[in-house]
């Protein structure tokens, strides 16, 4: 556990990323993307995968076109990727270590909380339902709800507005560099729980905490939020 920047004196809400933070989906996306790119003739794409972690579908599309050129068959890519992802999703979506404990503690407290995800509305709703978590969240903000997704702060600002709180009184929980930059730009203290890619020192320095899993994140939150301590 590595504590860095300051936590707000008064925490009004917690806003959670989805993929890679609550749901262990990034590895699934990575495998599907690598398989699809190899199928289309681009077998060595590890660097591209790392660069796309935390981005919305639209931003991933723009990245792919910029990386592989105007000849890249985006429509075929989408079709092949969706087929592979659907096959994996049908097998179930695992949650990240500590996710259920964190969500339970938030649900049992009087603290507002929400999801802010670069996923589409359809994808977020489906995956939350598949993972058995949808009923815990009244507020889910997706890339369909804002003009610009992460690393823009729009998702986090929209989530704070829907919860009726100031962004500077929120703690965000993220797994990726793009997500950390989005939350930081919104003025939120951020907990980083790295998933597939550990962000560099510059990104980590934007966080109030860098930890191994969501169990550690919950311990940290309990020390700063009285209603969470009372709920456990």
Image (spheres, rainbow, N blue to C red):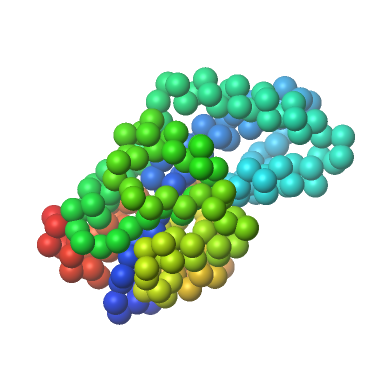
Left/right of residue 219 with respect to residue 60 in the rendered view: left
| Residue 2 shows in the view | no
- Closer-to-camera residue (98/131): 131
Q: Is residue 77 left or right of residue 213?
A: right
The residue at 87%/40% (across/down) is 70
Q: Residue at x 28, y 49 (%)?
A: 103
Across and down, in percent, residue 149 comes to: 59, 55
Viewer-nearest residue: 127 or 72: 127
Q: Give the position of the C terminus as an image quadrant.
A: bottom left
- Check the picture and name the quadrant holding the N terminus: bottom left
The image quarter containing residue 223 is bottom left
* Position above or below: 75 against 102: above
Nearer to me, 109 or 71: 109
Q: Please report the residue visible at 67 percent of the width from the left and 46 percent of the height from the top.
A: 58
What percent of the width, then of the height, locates residue 74?
Answer: 76, 33
172 on left or right of 62: left
Q: Is any atom of residue 96 visible in this view?
A: yes
Rendered location of residue 121, percent (x, y): 51, 42
**Residue drawn 33% across and 65% down?**
13
Q: Nearer the viewer, residue 27 or 147?
A: 147
Tally of numbered tags: 0
Q: In this rendering, would 22 be left or right of 175?
A: left
């Amino acid at each position: 556990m590595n504590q860095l920047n300051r936590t707000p004196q008064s925490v009004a809400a917690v806003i959670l990323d989805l993929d890679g933070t609550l749901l262990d989906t990034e590895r699934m996306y990575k495998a599907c993307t690598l398989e699809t790119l190899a199928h289309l003739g681009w077998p060595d794409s590890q660097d591209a995968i790392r660069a796309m972690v935390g981005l919305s579908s639209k931003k991933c599309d723009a990245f792919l076109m910029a990386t592989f050129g105007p000849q890249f068959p985006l429509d075929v890519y989408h079709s092949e990727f969706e087929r592979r992802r659907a096959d994996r999703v049908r097998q179930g979506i695992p949650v990240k270590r500590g996710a259920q404990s964190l969500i339970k503690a938030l649900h049992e407290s009087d603290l507002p909380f929400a999801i802010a995800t670069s996923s589409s509305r359809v994808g977020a709703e489906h995956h939350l339902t598949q993972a058995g978590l949808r009923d815990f969240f009244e507020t889910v903000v997706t890339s369909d709800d804002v003009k610009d997704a992460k690393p823009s702060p729009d998702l986090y600002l929209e989530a704070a507005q829907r919860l009726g709180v100031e962004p500077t009184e929120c703690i965000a929980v993220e797994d990726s560099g793009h997500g950390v930059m989005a939350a930081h730009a919104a003025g939120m203290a951020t907990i980083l729980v790295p998933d597939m890619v550990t962000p560099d020192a510059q990104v980590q320095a934007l966080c109030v905490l860098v930890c191994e899993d969501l169990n550690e994140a919950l311990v940290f939150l309990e020390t700063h939020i009285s209603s969470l301590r009372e709920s456990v």
